[in-house]
Every structure is written in structure tokens, then in C-alpha cells.
């Protein structure tokens, strides 16, 4: 008996060590909570599949019964949502994917081509039940894929995350980010009447997860301060109306979710939490607010100067970058600079023309000039996502025959013909180990470092939601509309109000049905994302841009067709191109009218004006470096056109 007991003890120790359990931690309660909720969801989803199989979908009573069962299944799914999104976000889209087909355009497109991902699960099943003709096999398949996806959450590679504290706090961070950006907006809940009831249930369910975690991980618990504030958040939501358009999104985020995020970030640092998941690839654990500009990293503005941290050296790079930004020496005819189209007094965009003039000085480009402010918070550059880095984009513009018309060879030759440029770049060469000569990358990186710094400014809304200053009543109403009835937040996610949603590794491309003219006689012919990644779903799709500084970056849309914010809001209110009578088979924007009232539209604009950032712009350089090439010395600061 002693020998058997000793063997069992040894086996137990080996299992605990292999599972990553630390001395003093008892994960039994936490893991039991996880598996109980997983089993419940699996049972509910399997029962839903069986009900669909046994039903006659031509009978309203059967459809009603399935809808009721689907709601119950969503309820049990939301009990697992805390874990599923983080532990395997790809499988989660099989359980609750919002789109029938999605092209993955994550940060990892910097390393691999985008791939087609078919959605499935409960959100799509709910949408399918609203259609006039429902095929049993199709509906059953949507739910069966959700059942099948649960198997992933039982594998060792996933469940071993239950054995240490680190994944919990990273799970919790994503949960809080989604509370601010996803859960209250209707992004993946087609029945808006259920958004707030689902939120209440989820908040309560996560309390059980918190209790189980603290029981098992007494050495690294959620603090009393955190748990008390979370209880207050539940009480706040319980007192709110059921209708999500009447829910106070602003106070919910400002008074509860953002402070909870701060406390969770403090615990991540205090407990020395380490991530091994790509979900955390871009997130910054040093920030204490969701509305910190540094919450995630999208682009590396330093480029080839990545290793440089010395502020004096960085200032020197920025200085030469500014000169180059205004220097038409980068163009084929020495008459056009970056500032020709990205005008600093226009928030680094072309605030005059719908689309800028081409290199030939006669024709115009087909797309509106996007602002360079806040581009560092995009994973993919250009409106079609063509480029993966700021430096690639800069180089492409300089060498595009219809934009700046230069060549890498000539640009480098002309820049180095200026003694001042040559001297500084020779000095900076020492800051790029492994590089033996000055290249075009040194030039583009200096430029991106210069304009990248203008993305660090905050807006009045940031100050308000961070409890620095108050927010005007109409602006608050506008934000709550933005997050609900106006449906803006289903594409423009906090904190950057662009298409990058938590966990900030992916970016949205949307098909809106933008017209060629304001009379809506024709759909814009620009194929958008299709030109980079040809697919039915990507035709006329464009990257969702940031709404920050929107008041100063007119005209709007990819072709600059709208001149005012009012026109843009009217376009969305009408249901986009389809709502205006255009044929857009793959439009991702709802074609239904939002039924916004004139006062509501006014409040929306009031809110968006609080996103105007307090940017300190700089005056252009007075002169440009002289060149040993005589003809180059006739160039003007900022270019001629």
C-alpha cells in the first residue's frame, strides 16, 4: 500500500508540475468553473441542433421555439465568452462570428497573405432566422460548427492556461476592452433588445469566474478594490434601461470600465504577468487607460532607426525628416513634396480638393488624400491596405509615376548631393547596425518619424473620459448615440475610433456603397481592397479610418465625394449606397435607415467635434539644403503644386 501511495503521489506531483501549477495554488475551483460552463454551453448548443433537425421551419411555432432555444444557447455561450475570445479567437468566430465570410487582415498580414475565413455560430444563426426562406440544413450547419468548435476548448493546449495566473489577467484585460468597445454596441448581437440583458447576465457570470479564480490563486488575487468597483458596475447596469439606445455608455465606460482596466493593468504589472499569446501582440501593459494613445502599437514610425532610444538622436532624425517632408527633391521633377498633398495646416491632408493633382499637373488621383495623423494606429496602410508599413507606403508614393514620379536611385543620388543631408545621414548610419551604406530606408524612416509624432496628441473627449475635464451634455448624448442607435461603434472602435477593434490585432474593411456623385446615379468604380486581395467580399471595400480630427479633414470618403459631416451622417442614416437605391450586393453596412432625428444628428456632430485633437503644428522650414547639382537648387519649400 505504501509503495502504491508513493507512486500515486509521485504521479500527482508530475502532473501538477507539467500543468504549471505553482505551490500554494489550488486551481480546482477555477478549472471546475471553466469546464462546468463549457459543458453547459455544449449541451445547450447540441440541444439546439437536435431541435432544428426535428422542426418544420415552415411553421411559425417551430421558428419561435428555435429562436427561444437560440436565446438560451447565447446565454450559456456568454458565460464562456470571457475565456473563448482570448484562448482561441479563431475558433470563437465559429461559435459567434458576426460575418458569413471574413478575410483575416490581422497584424500578421505583415508576415503572411490574408486568408478567407467562413463564419458560423449563433449570431449568424439568429440573422438567418430573420430571412424569408430558411433552409434547415444551412441553419443546422451554422450551429453544428459552433458545437464542433467547443472541442478546441477541451484540448491540453488551451486548458493548461487554467493552471497559471497570467492568462487570467490577460483574459480579463480583453474582457474589459470588449466591455468598452464591443458588448454594448450590437456588433455581434442582431437583436438589439437583448444587448443590455445579455450584458447583465455576462457581468454576473464573470463574478463567478472571479470568485473561483481568487479561491484557487490566493497569492495573486483580484484585489478588493477591483471587486468592489466591479460590483458597483453591476449595480449601475442593473439600474439602466433595457434598451441599448437609452443605456448610458459614456458613464459605464468612464466610471467603471476604464477604472477597472487601470486596476487590471496594475495587477498585470504587479504579478509580473507574461503573455505567450498572439492576442497580446500589440497591447501595452504600461498604460492605465483604454483612452491612452499608447494602448496598442500599430506601426513602427522609427523604421530602420528602431533601436534608437536616445532623445537627442531622435530629435536629429526628426529634424532631417521634417526637411525631407517639405523637400521636393524627393520627386522626379523637384517640384513636388510630401507636403504638396499632406498639408500640415490641413491636418496633413489635402483639405481643398476631393482628390489631389497627379504628377503631370493636369489629371487628378482617384482617391482622397488621407490624413497622416494617427496612421500609426493602423496595421495596414492606404485605403486598400496595400502596404504593411509606413516606410513602404512612403517609398511607394515617392516612386509612383502619377504621384511624386521619382525613382529610388535618383532620390538617393539627389539627397546625398546635398552636403547637409549627407553629413547627417553618415552620422546616423552608426545608429543602424548591419547597414554599411545610406539607403532609401534611412530617408523614408526619417520622414515617418517626423510626421509620426503628430499622432501622440489627445482630444477633449479623451480628457473627459479620463476624468480630467467635463463633457458637454450634447456631446455625451452624441457618444451614446454613436455607441447604439447610430451604429457607428460597430465599425469605429474605441479608443482610436477607427477599424481596429480589441485586441487590436485586426482591422476592418467595409463596403458602404459610396457613390460616384452626390445624386447617387452611380456607384463609385473604385474597387478598393479588391485590387489588393481579389474576392467577392472585398469588392469596393475600404479600410475604416479614424474619426479623430474629422472636422478638419474634409472632404470625406475614399473619393472625397462628401464635403460636410452632415452629408456623411445622412449617407449612413439612409443605409449607405443600397439604402439610396444603388445596387451593392456585398454591402456590409446595413441598408436599413437608422431613423436619426435632426437633433440626434446634431448631437453626433457635437460628439465627433470633441475628437478634434489639440495638435501643436510646426511652421515649415525657411530654407532647404543646397545641392551640388545646380538644377536641384531651384526647388521651393513644400513644392510648387
Image (cartoon, rainbow, N blue to C red):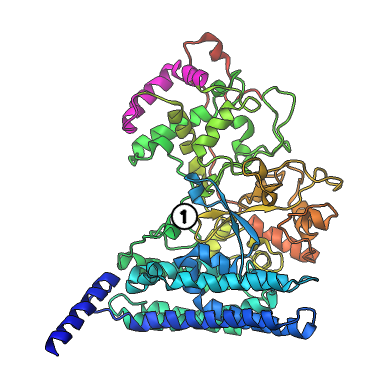
Residue at the image point whose x is 71% and y is 63% from the top = 603
Residue 274 horizontal/vertical position (percent)? 33, 62
Which residue is labeled 1 in the image? 296
Residue at the image point whose x is 36% and y is 77% from the top = 223
Q: Is residue 323 left or right of residue 223?
A: right
Residue at the image point whose x is 50% and y is 50% from the top = 107
Circle count = 1
> Which residue is situated farthest in the top direction here?
630
* Of 595 and 147, the residue lying toward us: 147
Residue 536 horizontal/vertical position (percent)? 70, 50
Can residue 310 be seen by looking at this rendering? yes
Residue 360 horizontal/vertical position (percent)? 70, 22
Residue 588 horizontal/vertical position (percent)? 71, 57
Stretch in magenta:
409-436
Can residue 183 be seen by looking at this rendering? no
Residue at the image point whose x is 51% and y is 57% from the top = 504
Q: Is residue 174 left or right of residue 368?
A: left
Look at the image and tell me in which quarter the C terminus lies. top right
Residue 55 is covered by the magenta coloring:
no
Predominant secondary structure, magenta span:
helix
Amino acid at each position: 500500500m505504501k509503495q502504491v501511495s508513493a507512486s500515486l503521489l509521485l504521479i500527482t506531483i508530475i502532473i501538477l508540475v507539467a500543468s504549471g501549477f505553482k505551490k500554494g495554488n489550488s486551481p480546482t475551483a477555477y478549472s471546475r468553473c471553466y469546464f462546468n460552463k463549457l459543458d453547459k454551453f455544449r449541451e445547450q448548443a447540441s440541444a439546439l441542433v437536435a431541435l432544428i433537425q426535428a422542426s418544420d421551419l415552415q411553421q411559425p411555432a417551430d421558428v419561435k421555439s428555435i429562436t427561444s432555444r437560440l436565446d438560451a444557447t447565447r446565454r450559456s455561450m456568454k458565460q464562456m465568452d470571457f475565456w473563448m475570445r482570448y484562448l482561441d479567437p479563431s475558433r470563437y468566430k465559429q461559435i459567434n462570428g458576426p460575418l458569413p465570410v471574413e478575410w483575416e487582415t490581422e497584424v500578421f498580414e505583415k508576415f503572411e497573405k490574408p486568408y478567407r475565413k467562413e463564419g458560423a455560430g449563433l449570431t449568424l444563426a439568429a440573422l438567418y432566422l430573420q430571412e424569408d426562406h430558411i433552409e434547415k440544413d444551412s441553419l443546422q450547419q451554422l450551429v453544428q460548427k459552433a458545437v464542433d468548435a467547443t472541442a478546441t476548448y477541451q484540448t491540453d493546449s488551451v486548458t493548461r492556461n487554467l493552471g497559471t495566473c497570467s492568462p487570467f489577467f490577460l483574459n480579463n484585460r480583453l474582457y474589459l476592452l470588449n466591455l468598452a468597445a464591443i458588448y454594448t454596441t450590437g456588433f455581434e448581437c442582431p437583436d438589439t433588445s437583448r444587448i443590455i440583458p445579455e450584458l447583465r447576465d455576462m457581468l454576473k457570470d464573470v463574478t463567478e469566474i472571479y470568485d473561483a479564480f481568487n479561491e484557487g490563486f490566493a497569492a495573486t488575487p483580484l484585489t478588493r478594490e477591483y471587486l468592489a468597483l466591479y460590483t458597483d458596475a453591476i449595480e449601475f447596469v442593473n439600474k439602466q434601461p433595457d434598451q441599448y439606445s437609452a443605456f448610458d455608455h459614456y458613464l459605464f465606460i468612464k466610471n467603471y470600465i476604464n477604472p477597472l482596466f487601470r486596476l487590471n493593468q496594475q495587477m498585470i504589472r504587479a504579478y509580473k504577468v507574461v503573455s505567450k499569446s498572439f492576442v497580446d501582440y500589440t497591447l501595452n501593459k504600461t498604460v492605465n487607460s483604454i483612452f491612452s494613445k499608447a494602448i496598442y502599437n500599430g506601426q513602427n514610425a522609427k523604421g530602420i532607426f528602431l533601436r534608437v532610444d536616445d532623445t537627442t538622436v531622435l530629435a536629429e532624425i526628426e529634424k532631417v525628416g521634417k526637411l525631407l517632408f517639405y523637400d521636393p527633391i524627393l520627386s522626379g521633377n523637384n517640384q513636388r513634396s510630401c507636403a504638396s498633398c499632406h498639408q500640415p495646416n490641413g491636418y496633413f491632408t489635402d483639405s481643398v480638393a476631393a482628390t489631389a493633382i497627379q504628377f503631370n499637373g493636369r489629371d487628378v488621383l482617384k482617391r482622397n488624400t488621407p490624413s497622416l495623423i494617427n496612421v500609426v494606429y493602423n496595421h495596414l496602410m492606404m485605403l486598400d491596405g496595400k502596404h504593411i508599413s509606413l516606410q513602404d507606403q512612403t517609398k511607394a508614393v515617392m516612386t509612383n509615376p502619377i504621384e511624386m514620379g521619382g525613382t529610388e536611385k535618383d532620390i538617393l543620388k539627389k539627397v546625398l548631393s546635398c552636403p547637409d543631408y549627407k553629413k547627417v545621414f553618415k552620422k546616423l548610419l552608426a545608429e543602424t547596425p548591419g547597414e554599411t551604406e545610406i539607403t532609401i530606408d534611412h530617408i523614408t524612416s526619417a520622414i515617418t518619424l517626423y510626421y509620426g509624432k503628430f499622432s501622440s496628441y489627445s482630444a477633449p473627449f479623451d480628457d473627459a473620459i479620463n476624468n480630467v475635464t467635463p463633457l458637454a451634455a450634447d456631446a455625451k448624448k452624441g457618444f451614446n448615440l454613436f455607441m447604439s442607435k447610430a451604429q457607428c461603434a460597430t465599425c469605429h472602435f474605441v479608443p482610436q475610433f477607427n477599424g481596429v477593434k480589441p485586441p487590436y490585432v485586426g482591422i476592418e474593411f467595409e463596403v458602404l456603397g459610396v457613390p460616384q456623385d452626390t445624386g447617387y446615379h452611380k456607384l463609385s468604380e473604385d474597387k478598393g481592397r479588391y485590387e489588393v486581395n481579389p474576392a467577392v467580399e472585398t469588392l469596393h471595400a475600404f479600410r475604416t479610418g479614424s474619426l479623430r480630427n474629422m472636422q478638419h479633414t474634409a472632404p470625406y470618403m475614399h473619393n472625397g465625394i462628401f464635403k460636410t459631416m452632415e452629408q456623411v451622417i445622412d449617407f449612413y442614416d439612409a443605409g449607405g449606397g443600397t439604402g439610396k437605391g444603388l445596387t451593392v450586393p456585398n454591402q456590409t453596412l446595413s441598408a436599413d435607415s437608422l431613423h436619426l432625428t435632426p437633433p440626434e444628428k446634431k448631437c453626433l456632430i457635437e460628439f465627433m467635434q470633441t475628437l478634434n485633437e489639440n495638435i501643436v503644428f510646426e511652421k515649415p522650414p525657411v530654407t532647404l539644403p543646397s545641392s551640388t547639382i545646380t538644377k536641384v537648387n531651384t526647388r521651393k519649400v513644400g513644392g510648387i503644386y
